[in-house]
Amino acid sequence: MFSTAFLDLPPLQGASGTVTLPGSKSISNRVLLLSALCQGTTVVHDLLDSDDTRVMLAALRQLGCGVEVAGTTVTITGLGGRTWPTEAIAFFMGNAGTAMRPLTAALAVQGGDFTLKGVPRMHERPIGDLVDALRELGCAIDYLGNEGFPPLHIGQPALKLDKPIPVRGDVSSQFLTALLMALPLAAQDRAITIEVVGELISKPYIEITLNLLARFGIAVERQGWARFVIPAGSRYQSPGSIHVEADASSASYFIALGAIAQGEGIRIQGVGANSIQGDIRFMDAAAQMGAHITSGPNWLEVQRGAWPLKGITLDCNHIPDAAMTLAVMALFADGPTTLRNIASWRVKETDRIAAMAAESRKLGATVEEGPDWITLHPLKPSQWQRASIHTYDDHRVAMCFSLAAFNPDQVPVRIEDPQCVAKTFPDYFEALFSVAHTAAANIPVICIDGPTASGKGTLASRVASALGYHYLDSGALYRVTAHAALQVGLTLEAADETAIAELARRLPVRFEGEQVLLGGMDVTDAIRSEQGGMNASKVSVLPAVRQALVQLQHSFQRLPGLLADGRDMGTVIFPNAPLKVFLTASAAQRAERRHKQLILKGISANIDTLRADLQARDARDMSRSVAPLLPAQDALQLDNSSLTIEASVEQVMVWWQSRQVFG
């Protein structure tokens, strides 16, 4: 997951390949709570690992449920047949509506001394209609802040089950879902009826709830969409084990990707046309806009069909979450697209109608909006604008607008706070980059060159982390090559140049944070020694070895970008890099830093000897016939003799930001 302040998406040209989706958020949190209300244990397979499910799991632990997590499999020991806790419990619900609403209802029906609060945005999300329905039932709920909004306090109920319980249907389907899941706790002696007031929105999400309730032994009688009857004697029964479908809402981004991007198409694993999730019907809307879609029992394949896409007018009540993706697809259409019946967007993680309108306008689009509709006009080639997309701590805003990077004008797009996707799809951007492709010239590279012990490795890795870019320590490649050559009995002399070069061509090396892995083995300490540095200098002067490593270094230029450090990154390996930094520091300062490093490792060292060695190595590197150590003509020089690493990172980031200007 990208945890950077922003993520710059370079211009993307096409996409092909296979994506495996995470589990559905809506199903995951429903299944967790239903499992908690059963007697005995339920094994939940393929559970989504996200912010929302972690909130629910934490709450279940507080209630006394047994929770055992093993990857995406979670075993829940339920509360059925057991005494619920009597002590006061305070729950922190974050911004997880799929946990807050049903848990509120279950706790209120059961009764206790419970407080539920969340992040500031959760305290702006209305819950009054659910609270009104629960109070009508006899539940004791008090607002601890603004009337109609969390935080809440729940006490002991005096349940009144002699008449139907009214609940508004035009605000959020999660309110009705919450009641449907909570009321079986009180239906042992008599049937309980829920009456929907007004039109019920998001009906497909209620279908998910009814389907899952049946899996847990609760056969709700549905009378149209106006009345729901929970039979007398209802009691939760564990299915033993249950599998969570992949998230159909998450599928929408890759369905749209297949419809927009050039390529051989996208295969989506984990969900098919027969899904119980209403958002799977997004595929029908995408097909109406021009996508070519085929489906199997647990997969979809999507290819670009009509181009440009077709503008449509659609009632989106049946796909409220997935419909957001249509708003970005609309920018690639041949005429305006109007999405109607989306009032629920106003009360989600953010006001999604306002958010989609504002961010689309940044890209250059003309947008009109109303209380429950939005109309987006397409952007023609030459009209797309660079934009920094504000994501409002809303995962769907971030994922939707990532598709704008496939624009025909080849302008980059910045996604602010990319880690907000953790709510439902923590590895979304990794999945996107695994299938997206573009010309190498579009993938940004920042080069940081400099002499030995100048601190370029630390600086480069810190900047890479701040940008979410891949990291290449070219010096480590030479060190690893020398290490691997010695391991197989080669000398580091010209006599073995050909053999070392062949070894270098197939070097199975990768960087994971501070670690350097060779064929899966951690060789970090082995190559970071003083001798490792001397060995690297020996192989670096062998022309055949240098040539063999050039292609390997080029292979590190992958989406979304690369931070490369070394001694010839900006002059030889990536001469067209948009930012080149030449890092310098006095030999005395570098010797002092190296001396401190060695002492911390318990290695004795003489600072004068270190300084002399560094000066000798500088002279050797600067005078070598192949790629001598010199700054590129367009490199910016940074003397960090008196700078902290934080100040150096800040300077490089300022330089980079000046070259990556977004509206």
Image (spheres, rainbow, N blue to C red):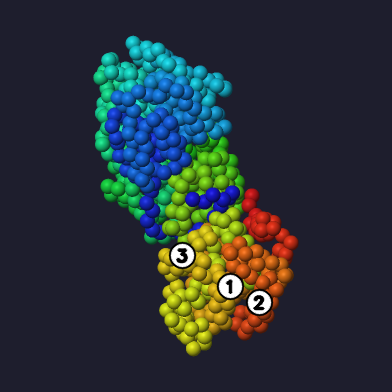
The three-letter amino acid code for the residue at tag 2 is: Asp
Q: Which residue is mark 2?
A: 613
Residue drawn 49% across the image and 60% down it: 512
- Residue 161 higher or lower than 263, as above or below: above
Residue 642 appears at what percent x and percent y?
74, 61
Query: Could you give the CA–CA distance between mark 3 and mark 2, rounded to whole angstroms?
Result: 27 Å
Residue 196 appears at what percent x and percent y?
38, 21
- Residue lying at the far bottom of the rendered structure: 495
Q: Nearer the viewer, residue 93 or 281?
A: 93
**Residue 444 at least partly seen:** no
Total numbered labels placed on residues in the image: 3
The three-letter amino acid code for the residue at tag 1 is: Glu
Residue drawn 42% across the image and 65% down it: 520
Residue drawn 65% across the image and 64% down it: 596
**Residue 594 at least partly seen:** yes
Q: Nearer the viewer, residue 614 or 50?
A: 614
Q: Secondary structure at mark 3?
A: strand
Q: Nearer the viewer, residue 515 or 502?
A: 515
Closer to the chain start, of discs 3 and 2, is 3
Please rate how many residues cluster around mark 3, counting C-alpha atoms within 10 Å: few if below 14, some from 14 to 19, many from 20: some
Closer to the chain start, of discs 1 and 3, is 3
The three-letter amino acid code for the residue at tag 3 is: Asp
Q: Secondary structure at mark 1?
A: helix
Contact between marks 2 and 1 (CB within 8 A): the answer is yes
Closer to the chain start, of discs 2 and 1, is 1
Q: Which residue is mark 3?
A: 522
* Residue 430 in the figure: left or right of residue 165: right
Please rate how many residues cluster around mark 1, counting C-alpha atoms within 10 Å: few if below 14, some from 14 to 19, many from 20: few
Q: Secondary structure at mark 2?
A: helix
Where on the picture, by quarter, is residue 101? Answer: top left
Residue 18 appears at what percent x and percent y?
37, 56
Q: Which mark is residue 530?
A: 1
